Image (cartoon, coloured by chain):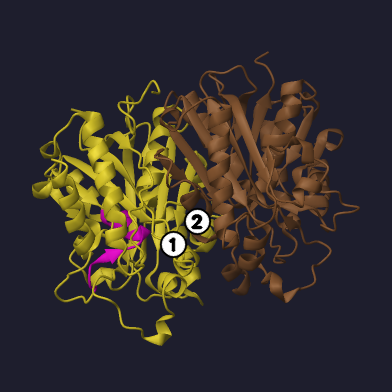
Chain colours: A yellow, B brown
């Protein structure tokens, strides 16, 4: 086991990076949801002045990058690395959105786990002394994701009850070697899990085993109990996947029910917003973390949060070739103070 | 600037990771090229017993992972992380190829720069004490890449003179905190460069500015001269891009000509193999490094190598939307010994 590991999957960060600033922009639908007051900006429509949805998603990345470094009172040349990725083929939202930044760039692909993946790698680079400031970010867009993964919107296809609604938005954090918190104290890195779910309209079920596996590993590695955290929050399991994850953990002797929520459940009003099983997409966990959860940490309403973003690692081609859907989840433990 | 940086883009690794083992499998065409004796295995045909090219690519990843840890005399549970990605939409070659490993997984997307990206992040994690052993790897496949990025092979489309041939294969290294070399001493992380090239059949020209930019940054940050290295090798610029890169550097006062080669030029015989401007794809640099270059380092024919894998960060959608092609390149300095 590596020097700084505690257990197979978890690192305890001795020089915990501080989340110096966050930024989150969302689409109009997210801007009418229960967390609407926590985002920095709500774009007026899905195109936001661009001539394609993909370009609008790149613009979200570009503008959120600019916003987060402005909020952190930094300039581009003070950012050592930007770690980013997205759902679009070849991650073009990140590449095109960040191509003018002149910041050393590591592209990531973790599907909807990308926010936690970027914060995990970012935390290791800051803790290891390789970076003073790192921008971690991701994006997704309802229209570009539907076109790419499912059906063109113009078809007006009916959605299944287990379907989720890809969040339009981008979320970002600046991790810093110097800062006043909140701090990242542990990261638990996920393994790929595939229990054989093949329904691309039931991503929550496909990702739930990975979420349960990573949450279980986190508590096993750290020796902590679920009530240590005020909130254990998964990325985008939605209503269906959240229930499965909770039950899988209970079957393994870990009851997280009183602390557990899911960004996909939180971001939309399930009664009135017609989003079926809830929100999904890289931006789901990223904007809820950078918006709502970060505010709650700063205000002291939350003191310790286990943020577990979840990704489904399939593509339309793997689905057409009758493959099942592998899932992954990475956990980042965020503390309001160092105590 | 971060504690362990020397210059904007470069880290000097105080505890340099050792490349404990490498493995490389290639396709039949690569297995007839000038480097054929340096690969571990040449697959008999492009499907390799699978029912799709994508599944054959995943099998390459799965088998090369197994091979590299066997050569390193390690087991899966001794690998702290696997860092991998590929060219397929949503990086399914890596995700499906590695889903049974039970190793904590960080998915990367750096297009054809992925090998250097994985070794860069891997080196930081080993140097920082976060990992004892890391597997870094990537893959590409001629048939799956043509289908996805250009035209279905069945169309029999004519190729342009500047077109390159995507290498079928997978290359991998084990980076280790303990080992007898070769060692990684510096990494130089690239910024996204986009000088406006829009021709998806001239990727070499699109990537050349990024390669030149990263090579220039490496020598600026380290204060070294090109003749410090026995070999400065880019990933897959091909004949056209190599020439452009060399000239761009010369215009900036850096003459690397006597040391410079490109994996895309090396892997095929340009006279007899009908590969136009040369090889490309994630596996181009990965297999040439893990096969030929590693052997030369072990045998002492090369003592110091600057490995600069190059990626074009576009997608078919960005090309259809008339976007130019951003490039990126990451450099990894490999030394036979610590002296």
Q: Evaluate whether residue A83 shows in this view.
A: yes
- Image position of A81 (left or right of A338): right
Dot 2: what SS?
A: helix
Do the numbered discs 1 and 2 sit on residues whose CB atoms are within 8 Å? yes
Image quarter in which the C terminus of chain A is found: top left
**Residue B300 image offset from top left, x and y in percent:** 77, 20
**Residue B212 image offset from top left, x and y in percent:** 73, 44
Question: Going 16% across and 51% down the picture, which residue do you hit?
Answer: A246
Chain for numbered disc 2:
B
Q: Evaluate whether residue A264 shows in this view.
A: no
Q: Residue furthest right?
A: B271
As displayed, is residue B326 above or below residue A188?
A: below
Q: Residue furthest left?
A: A258
Question: Going 68% across and 13% down the picture, which residue do you hit?
Answer: B339
- Image position of A25 (left or right of B326): left
As displayed, is residue B228 above or below residue A186?
A: above
To which quarter of the image does residue B157 belong?
A: bottom right
The residue under label 2 is B92
| Residue range (magenta) | A275-288
Q: CA distance from mark 1 to mark 2?
A: 11 Å
Determine if marks 1 and 2 fall on one subunit: no
The residue under label 1 is A323
As displayed, is residue A56 above or below residue B145?
A: below
Dot 1: what SS?
A: loop
**Residue B292 image offset from top left, x and y in percent:** 74, 34
């Amino acid at each position: 086991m590596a020097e700084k590991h505690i257990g197979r999957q978890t690192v305890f960060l001795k020089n915990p990076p501080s989340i110096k600033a966050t930024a989150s922009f969302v689409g109009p639908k997210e801007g009418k949801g229960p967390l609407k007051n926590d985002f920095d900006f709500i774009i007026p429509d899905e195109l936001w002045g661009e001539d394609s949805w993909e370009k609008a998603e790149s613009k979200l990345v570009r503008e959120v990058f600019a916003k987060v470094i402005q909020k952190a009172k930094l300039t581009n040349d003070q950012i050592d690395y930007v770690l980013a990725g997205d759902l679009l083929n070849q991650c073009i939202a990140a590449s095109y959105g960040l191509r003018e930044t002149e910041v050393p760039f590591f592209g990531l692909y973790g599907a909807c786990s990308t926010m936690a993946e970027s914060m995990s790698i970012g935390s290791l680079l800051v803790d290891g002394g390789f970076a003073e400031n790192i921008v971690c970010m991701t994006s997704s867009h309802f229209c570009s994701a539907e076109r790419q993964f499912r059906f063109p919107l113009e078809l007006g296809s009916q959605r299944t009850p287990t379907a989720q609604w890809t969040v339009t938005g981008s979320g970002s954090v600046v991790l810093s070697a110097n800062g006043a918190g909140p701090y990242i104290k542990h990261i638990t890195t996920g393994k790929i899990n595939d229990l054989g779910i093949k329904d691309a309209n039931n991503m929550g079920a496909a990702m739930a085993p990975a979420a349960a596996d990573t949450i279980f590993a986190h508590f096993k590695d750290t020796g902590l109990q679920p009530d240590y955290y005020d909130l254990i929050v998964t990325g985008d399991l939605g209503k269906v996947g959240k229930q499965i994850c909770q039950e899988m953990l209970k079957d393994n002797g870990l009851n997280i029910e009183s602390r557990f929520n899911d960004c996909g459940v939180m971001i939309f009003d399930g009664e009135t917003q017609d989003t079926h099983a809830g929100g999904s997409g890289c931006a789901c966990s990223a904007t809820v973390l950078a918006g709502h959860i970060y505010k709650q940490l700063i205000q002291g309403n939350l003191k310790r949060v286990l943020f577990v973003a979840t990704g489904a690692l399939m593509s339309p081609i793997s689905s057409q070739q009758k493959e099942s859907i592998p899932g992954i989840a990475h956990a980042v433990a965020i503390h309001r103070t160092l105590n």
